[in-house]
């Protein structure tokens, strides 16, 4: 029962292939415009990774991951906006030195909760801590009361709706429906240039691989096995002396933290953040990415995210109306025909072929892990 | 406050009702150190409810449950387990997709907090303990087998093993030999008699032959109340027991 950082050799190979694809193949194949788009897609993959642990492994379906993605993105955007709103840049405003949308909304002083976002280190910490804390509060309120399943999903969805309404309504403090736009520099470094976009793409890719490793580490610890165990046999885990709710809170916060990093990288690469990434629709789309990848496969989640978003780009460039139907149809097909998504297809068809070709030891570890994780109820 | 009794478990005036129906009513009994107490009674007598109450799954409306003098009724399930009460369910409740080894490993009482579990390592002490328990439950040759492939009786033993590895002072077993073959029953009785040396056991069972083999003391429940208790021979001769339970 030797356990390494990676569940098995197959996993290590999969990880290396993904790293090569993200960090070598994509930058060589795509021009900077497309690469920046891929970078944007990959920020959603952070959310999908969190969902694998939270939904695939622990069985907690959150339909509000956009909330954490958005909060992370907003924390980053607030810092960038303040830097872009220096008194020189905003001297034509009636109150120079505050973000433009505040000026348009007759706000005359920077609100207190914006003040700390002058500091980059505070903002970077806030990117992870604010969404994780929010998730902690939700988790504490829900899981301690043993709210789960459909009820939990509905509540997360309601939270996504409420937060969207709040942000849109508080236009003067949040930028409203337009979001926080016109972001320019990070500590004087212009993030809008092609060169900056290339560097940000690599930072994003590196962070994503790091997040994947971290999630894989969590998955193969005793905690990871307990998450699956409490999904399938909650009472047994509880009567083995574990506080089930605290484990659920942990995995929910972990997923929120990952989503938030994705959100912050989105803001940096796309150059704005708005309430349209928080609401119900994006939150559900993120669940679809995870489902398409195979809800208990971390690497699958990244491919699922890429596949759906490439599909969206291709289809919506040629047939804009068709995309929504295609996506809905795909989701139904996945649920009904391939409940284990891309990872399931790989395990069923490709993995045996590869194993026969190489005959390199026993790759049983990964298959066992995948089938452990893929019990659906 | 010195309590003069040294009972492992004292249940006093315990009551619970579901929608006005009193499932357990004014129940008082004690479990001694190193004692096997068996609760018998017809279906719906409230036997499983008693276990649910002790392990915190159901909350009592009145009465007290003291374990080593410590009140359990206000504690949550995992706190009760950590205090030293282990519970086996009626249907084997094990992790089917994990191996026997992993089932025991996950039940090992270390790394029970979130971060404890995150940095838990299966070291020599854990392996040794798992091997020891596996031998006790007759599964030493099945450690790497997935639990779903075990026979029904072996699953029951595995669940008992998952409790034993926590070394509880009180072990509660809900119908441990239901669905077992004759041979397996004999082995289970032997197992219980072996593990009793360090702990007390509370058993719910229907199989009278098995009860006679293991019980030090028997309690007969009927409609949530104790109608008879004492040694098996005495209980068997009680006309009330014969009428509601044994007589058919």
Image (cartoon, rainbow, N blue to C red):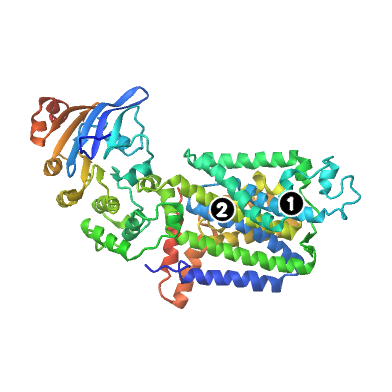
Query: Is A363 rendered above or below residue B177?
Result: below
Can I make out residue B199 in this image?
yes
Q: Quadrant of residue B52?
A: top left
**Residue at image point 73% right, 60% down:** A269
**Residue at image point 34% right, 34% down:** B73
**Residue at image point 87% right, 55% down:** A89
Residue at mark 1: A78
Q: Nearer the viewer, mark 2 or mark 1?
A: 1
Horizontal and vertical percent for residue A36?
Answer: 73, 64
**Side of B13 where B111 appears, left or right:** right
Q: Quadrant of residue B108?
A: bottom left
**Side of A261 where A271 appears, left or right:** right
**Quadrant location of the C terminus of chain B in the rendered image:** top left
**Side of A7 where A106 appears, left or right:** right
**Residue at image point 70% right, 71% down:** A27
Chain identifier of the residue bearing label 1 in the image: A
Nearest to the observer: residue A354 or residue A88: A88
For label 2, count other residues whose C-alpha is less than 10 Å away and answer few (under 14), some (14-19) or many (20+): many
- Spatial CA distance of label 2 from label 1 is 22 Å
Q: Which mark is residue A255?
A: 2
In the orientation shown, which residue stands out farthest toward the right?
A92
Asked whether the residues under the numbered discs 2 and 1 touch, taking CB atoms below 8 Å apart as contact, a structural biologist would say no
Nearest to the observer: residue B192 or residue A64: B192
In the orientation shown, which residue stands out farthest toward the front?
B1
At mark 1, the secondary structure is helix
């Amino acid at each position: 029962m030797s356990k390494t950082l990676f569940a098995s050799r197959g996993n290590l190979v999969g990880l290396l292939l993904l790293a090569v694809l993200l960090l070598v193949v994509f930058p060589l194949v795509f021009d900077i415009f497309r690469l920046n788009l891929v970078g944007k897609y990959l920020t959603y993959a952070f959310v999908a990774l969190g969902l694998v642990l939270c939904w695939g492994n622990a069985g907690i379906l959150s339909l509000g991951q956009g909330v954490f993605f958005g909060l992370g993105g907003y924390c980053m955007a607030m810092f960038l906006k303040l830097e872009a709103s220096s008194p020189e840049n905003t001297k034509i405003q009636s109150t120079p030195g505050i973000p433009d949308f505040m000026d348009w909304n007759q706000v005359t002083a920077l609100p207190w909760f914006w003040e700390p976002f002058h500091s980059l280190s505070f903002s970077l910490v806030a990117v992870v801590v604010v969404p994780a804390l929010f998730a902690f509060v939700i988790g504490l309120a829900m899981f301690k009361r043993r709210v789960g399943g459909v009820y939990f999903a509905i509540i997360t969805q309601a939270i996504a709706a409420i937060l969207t309404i709040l942000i849109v309504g508080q236009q003067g403090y949040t930028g409203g429906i337009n979001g926080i736009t016109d972001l320019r520099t990070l500590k004087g470094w212009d993030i809008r240039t092609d060169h900056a976009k290339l560097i940000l793409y690599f930072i994003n890719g590196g962070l994503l691989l790091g997040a994947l490793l971290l999630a894989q580490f969590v998955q193969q610890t005793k905690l990871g096995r307990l998450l699956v165990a409490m999904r399938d046999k909650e009472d047994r885990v509880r009567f083995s002396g574990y506080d089930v709710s605290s484990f659920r809170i942990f995995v929910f916060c972990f997923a929120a933290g990952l989503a938030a990093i994705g959100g912050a990288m989105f803001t940096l690469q796309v150059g704005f953040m708005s309430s349209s990434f928080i609401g119900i629709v994006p939150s559900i789309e993120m669940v679809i990415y995870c489902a398409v990848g195979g809800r208990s496969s971390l690497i699958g989640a990244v491919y699922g995210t890429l596949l759906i978003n490439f599909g969206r780009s291709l289809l919506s460039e040629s047939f804009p109306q068709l995309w929504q139907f295609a996506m809905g149809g795909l989701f139904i097909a996945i649920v009904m025909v391939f409940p284990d998504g891309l990872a399931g297809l790989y395990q069923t068809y490709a993995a045996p072929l590869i194993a026969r070709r190489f005959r390199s030891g026993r790759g049983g570890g990964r298959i066992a892990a995948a089938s452990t994780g893929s019990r659906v109820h | 406050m010195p309590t003069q009794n040294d009972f492992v478990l004292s249940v006093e005036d315990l009551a619970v009702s579901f929608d006005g129906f009193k499932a357990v009513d004014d129940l008082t009994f004690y479990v001694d150190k190193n004692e096997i107490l068996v609760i018998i009674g017809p279906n719906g007598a409230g036997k499983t409810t008693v276990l649910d109450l002790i392990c915190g799954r159901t909350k009592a409306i009145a009465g007290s449950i003291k374990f080593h003098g410590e009140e359990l009724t206000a504690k949550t399930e995992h706190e009760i387990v950590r205090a030293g009460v282990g519970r086996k369910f009626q249907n084997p409740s094990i992790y089917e997709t994990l191996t026997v080894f992993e089932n025991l490993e996950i039940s090992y009482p270390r790394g029970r907090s979130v971060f404890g579990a995150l940095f838990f390592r299966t070291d020599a002490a854990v392996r040794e303990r798992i091997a020891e328990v596996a031998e006790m439950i007759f599964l030493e040759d099945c450690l790497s087998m997935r639990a779903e492939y075990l026979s029904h009786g072996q699953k029951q033993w595995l669940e008992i093993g998952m409790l034993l590895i926590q070394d509880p002072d009180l072990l509660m077993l809900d119908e441990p030999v239901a669905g077992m073959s004759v041979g397996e029953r004999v082995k289970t009785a032997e197992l219980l008699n072996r593990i009793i040396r360090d702990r007390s056991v509370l058993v719910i069972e229907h199989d009278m032959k098995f009860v006679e083999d293991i019980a030090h003391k028997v309690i007969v429940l009927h409609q949530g109340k104790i109608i008879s208790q004492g040694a098996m021979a005495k209980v068997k001769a009680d006309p009330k027991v014969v009428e509601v339970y044994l007589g058919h």
